[in-house]
């Protein structure tokens, strides 16, 4: 008899040093001053989980609009982002604005559902509060139409 033991999901915030997490959280709070510090730190974790899932995925994944704002904040720290991708993820995760073919990829809502499944599959926590549009509309990727694309890089 084989016993399969499930591990609890990991908070992706552990992928970055505390100082950089704090910087990214504060940068997003400048754009959204009403956002609490705790919520901003959770958002950093969801962005990191998205990036880790994107690095492991052979198909495009799509962030929620809010997760995309955290990704944009990280991208502005180009050296830190490049080093994170290389040393932590093992590959560069490109930010690819633009529309993906809905017939091929299922549209934004389907892509984000796939993204949440991909995050869970690699062992990270999905914080549903950062993916609210899964319950409301079948929109395209996000307000800026961003996604990762395994076809680039």
Image: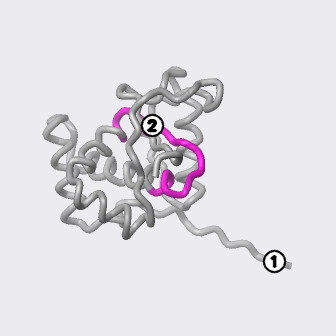
Residue 71 image offset from top left, x and y in percent: 32, 45
Q: Is residue 120 left or right of residue 133?
A: right
Decide if residue 122 is on the left or right side of residue 153: right
Give the extent of the magenta segment: 52-67
Alpha-carbon span between mark 2 and mark 1: 36 Å
Q: If you read the primary sequence from the N terminus, does the residue marked by circle 2 or circle 1 appear first?
A: 1
The color scheme shown is one colour
Q: How busy is the neighbourhood of tag 1: few (under 14 within 10 Å), some, or many (20 plus)?
A: few
Residue at image location 21% in from the left, 42% down from the top: 28
Looking at this view, is 91 or 57 the one in front? 91
Residue underneath mark 2: 131
Furthest-right residue in this view: 1
Residue contact between numbered discs 2 and 1, judged by CB atoms under 8 Å: no
Q: Secondary structure at mark 1?
A: loop
The residue at 33%/63% (across/down) is 84
Q: Which residue is nearer to you in this view: 92 or 49?
A: 92
**96 in the magenta segment:** no
| Mark drawn on residue 149 | none
Q: Residue at x 52, y 52 (%)?
A: 119
Judging by the rendered image, the residue that carries numbered circle 1 is 2
Q: Determine whether 4 is above or below 12 in the image.
A: below
- The percent coordinates of residue 104 (x first, y second) are 64, 30
């Amino acid at each position: 008899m084989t016993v399969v033991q499930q591990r609890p999901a990991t908070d992706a915030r552990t992928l970055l040093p505390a100082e950089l997490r704090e910087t990214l959280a504060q940068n997003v709070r400048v754009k959204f001053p009403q956002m609490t510090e705790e919520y901003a730190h959770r958002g950093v974790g969801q962005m990191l989980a998205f990036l880790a899932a994107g690095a492991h995925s052979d198909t495009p994944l799509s962030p929620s609009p809010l997760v995309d704002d955290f990704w944009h904040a990280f991208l502005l720290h180009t050296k830190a982002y490049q080093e994170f991708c290389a040393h932590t993820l093992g590959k560069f995760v490109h930010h690819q604005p633009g529309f993906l073919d809905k017939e091929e990829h299922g549209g934004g809502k389907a892509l984000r559902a796939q993204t949440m499944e991909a995050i869970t599959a690699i062992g990270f926590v999905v914080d549903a509060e950062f993916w609210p549009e899964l319950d409301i509309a079948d929109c395209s990727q996000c307000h800026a139409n961003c996604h990762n694309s395994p076809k680039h890089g």
